[in-house]
Amino acid sequence: MNDIIEDGEAVEVMILPLDQWHRDAGARMVEFAGYHMPIQYEGIIAEHGWTREHAGLFDVSHMGQLMVTGPDVAAALERVLPGDISALKEGRVRYSLLLNEDGGILDDLMVTNTGDGYYLVVNGAVKWDDIAWLHENLPETVTLTHLDESALLALQGPEAATALARIVPGVTDLTFMQAMVADWNGHTLGISRSGYTGEDGFEISVPAEAAQALADALVAMEEVKPIGLGARDSLRLEAGLPLYGHDMTETVDPVTADLAFAISKRRRNEGGFIGADTVLPLLERGAGARRVGLKVEGRMAAREGAGVFAGEARIGTVTSGGFAPSVGQPIAMATIATGHDMPGTRVTIEMRGRQIEATVAEMPFVPHRYHRKAKTGA
Amino acid sequence: MTTYFTKDHEWIAVEGDTGTVGITQYAQEQLGDITFVELPGAGDTVKKGDAVSVVDSVKAASDVYTPVSGEVTANNETLEEAPETVNSDPETAGWLFKVTLSDPSELDGLMDESAYKDYVASL
């Protein structure tokens, strides 16, 4: 059984502001991205279900929070990001990618126009590499600041807005992918209506010294419970949201990762971002493979690395997978050769010498319930 | 009946030449919600230390190693419909398989309950 049971403490694992708070709340801590992080409290399935029905509080302080400021900063960022940063209005959030010269994905991230500059949230596991890459590839006229004195909390679920509005009333004015700054007990919070669960919810940047008080204030509400990284992973998988380092890596391009939407129209026409020479032709002619969802038959989960077959022919690889509590069966994401990637296509997954049947499925597996701005009549 | 424990957190309850194997309370706590259990088939010949069963949790899949060599005589079919029994009753109703011991001396290297308790406390 030892492959799952974490033995001993790794050296130089870093401590996040809410470390003791998690332990006091009964969390099991594991090492993740170089930090001690809570994997679960009462159990992944219960926490997953709570988030889908009420509101879950996630500590994602391991993620990198960066601020980029300076003259012509939007143009500078457009060198390293394939999104239309110039068109991103103040108070708006956009999903983007860091690409290498070969068009491989170095990271995925969220960009917010704060008015004074751009606030980026990058993955914890690669944040130091991202910072080095940005230093190397941004002009010296812009300033990159690592907000390492701030914690990051996510409050996710259908009751998240009700709960957060009790202490920060202004958040009900936000719609999906909008952001604001708010004062809470004398502390400045950066709040966006976004997340990684497919549910309505918020991500809250809070000064480290106020993180515990904010977490306490939120979990004191009947709607809110703390949720670990285990349920964060099962929730994002059901929401069809890829996980960096698994569903995409630096050897996977945005077209294969099915993230071409992150390359905006103007940028497709104009190029001018790192990786454009590789990625733009792929947008035209396809990449030969694509990230898809799989619904897996039976109860045995397909896991990362498992081969995907059409008959005898290997057509792809599972990039992440597991039991989906809200679906009630195992699901997976896989990169599959074009031609086998349409929903409804039957495939076989090889797991531990066994063949398991699966079907290419539309994602998300569980419908998104974001709080979108009402569309005005056509 | 005597129950022995392994460092890999399996237990084996031995009566005569038959052992019943499962995972411990500590193991199920570490694994979290169990969603699927793959069991060895009756008639399978197994060798001490072989990965003969897999316990799938929401988090990951984990091998279960047989603490003894012998022939599998039965597996716990109720786990097919109710794998969560391994969470609720890991050391009773959540047993995994029964094995006829081919070499009872293999039990000598295993821990008794108090030694296992000390081992878990040291982790």
Image: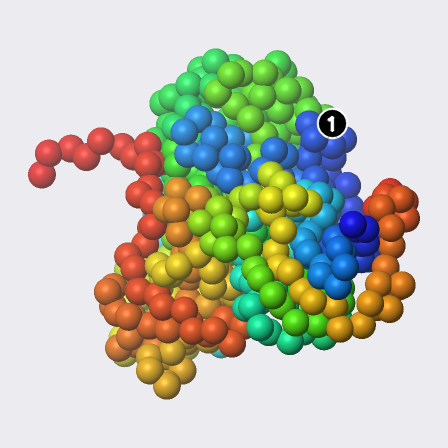
Q: How many labels does the image show?
A: 1
Task: Judge from the rendering whether residue A232 lies leftward or rightward of residue B99; answer left or right.
Answer: left
Seen at 50% across and 71% down, the residue is A351
Specify whether residue B8 is in view. no
Helix, strand or loop at label 1? It is: helix
User: In the rendered view of the protein, which quadrant contains the C terminus of chain A?
Assistant: top left
Query: On screen, A372 above or below A280?
Result: above
Seen at 47% across and 31% down, the residue is A50
The residue that mark 1 highlights is A24
In front: B110, or B26? B110
Q: Position of residue A158 (x, y in %)?
A: 39, 28
In front: A213, or B30? B30
Seen at 47% across and 73% down, the residue is A354
> Residue A82, located in which quarter of the rendered image?
bottom left
Q: Residue furthest front?
A: B16
User: In the rendered view of the protein, which quadrant contains the N terminus of chain A?
Assistant: bottom right
Query: On screen, A376 above or below B76?
Result: above
Mark 1 belongs to chain:
A
Specify whether residue A181 is in view. yes
In front: A308, or A96? A308
Q: Position of residue A317 (x, y in %)?
A: 45, 73
Q: Where is residue A81 in the image (x, y as percent from the top left)?
A: 46, 59
> Residue A37, located in which quarter of the rendered image?
top right
Say which amino acid is labelled 1. Answer: Asp
